[in-house]
Amino acid sequence: MNTFDNEKWKAAFASLSEAVKTQMDYSAAMKIRSMRAEIFQQTVAIVNEGKYLAKSGKSVHLPNDRLMIERTVLYSSPIHLDENNSRQEKTKVKVENCDCLLAAKALLDAGYNPAVLNMASRQNPGGGVYNGAGAQEENLFRRTNLFRSMFQFAHYAAQYGLKKSPSQYPLDMNFGGVYTPDATVFRGTEQDGYPLLDEYFQVSFIAVPAMNRPDLDKKGLIAPHLTEGVKNKMRTIFRIGLLMGHDALILGAAGCGAFRNPPVHIARLFHEVMEEEEFKDRYKLISFAILEDHNSGHEHNPEGNYMPFKMEFSNNDL
């Protein structure tokens, strides 16, 4: 059993990324996608093997994922919560420029029971992970065993040794979501070269897709006739988390990358939904973990995605 040289991968990735950035090198961009796709195939092989050799030389055995698969739930209609659900003293809100899985580990270590938002594809689980796409959902699939939870809802389930579920993608446009309990995280960040961790950890995920390239008004905000649909997606995230007993959420700039949602408006809508009676002070902590990437600095997000969220929640006055 050979270990994975993340430093070698990291150096090659950095070199190609620089070529794309400075020279608009198409072949380098394709090589980056190929490198990411290979990481996912390696992740699948490791999960199927059930063990790996960390860089330190430690042999790490992954936990059985049968219960994760069985307890994964696909939602297609509105979720109704118990009105007596207990309230917390006051929801604390954080906006951090950090990786969502690193944020999850920090909350777990601090004693929280968090769920992480998977900013998912509506059409197929894992989005473009097979082809090396670089968005958040694909990143999660490369670093965890999430594919074992979510590929049961795809027509290719059997190719991954999974029983095909009667429920299948695409997800409902308003209320579609997938809850995955206790997925196993065993790889580090892309920035660090996807290292195999000495110690895995487990965290739950809520997959809800954002609206894809919504119509915008003259002010660059989401068109009024679409905002309720966007809010329904946010409500689905909050409801699944509460239904499953989580006291913290790790969210992100949902849809503000390739889906071209304006972060100023998405942050405001999240704030409004968090203030609704159904959700106000129901969570101990809500953290927005936001990293800038190649989808930042465009017409819909000229200041990036982090700053609009930071400004919206700067008073932390929920």
Image (spheres, rainbow, N blue to C red):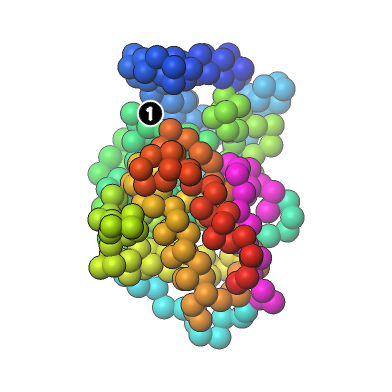
Residue drawn at (64%, 39%) of the image: 200
Image height of 9 relative to 296, above or below: above
Q: Quadrant of the C terminus?
A: bottom right
Q: In the visual, does 68 lie left or right of 186?
A: left
Dot 1 amino acid type: Gly
Q: In the visual, does 162 lie left or right of 276?
A: left
Q: Looking at the image, which is closer to me, 181 or 229? A: 229
Residue drawn at (28%, 49%) of the image: 213
In the rendered image, which residue does mark 1 sit on? 132
Residue drawn at (51%, 53%) of the image: 308
Image position, residue 285 (x, y; %):
64, 63
Image position, residue 127 (x, y; %):
34, 41
Residue 102 appears in view: yes
Q: Quadrant of the N terminus?
A: top right
Where are the magenta residues, as a range? 88-108
Q: In the visual, does 15 lie left or right of 318?
A: left
Image position, residue 21 (x, y; %):
44, 21
Q: Is residue 109 magenta?
A: no
Residue 72 appears in view: no
Local crowd size for mark 1, using a 10 Å CA cut-off: few (<14), some (14–19), many (≥20): many
Q: Looking at the image, which is closer to me, 141 or 70? A: 141
Q: Residue furthest front?
A: 218
Q: Residue 190 sits in which quadrant?
A: top right
Q: Residue 230 sits in which quadrant?
A: bottom left
Image position, residue 55 (x, y; %):
67, 22
Image height of 303 relative to 85, above or below: above
Q: Is residue 98 magenta?
A: yes
What is the secondary structure assignment of the residue under circle 1?
A: loop
Q: In the visual, does 61 lie left or right of 21?
A: right
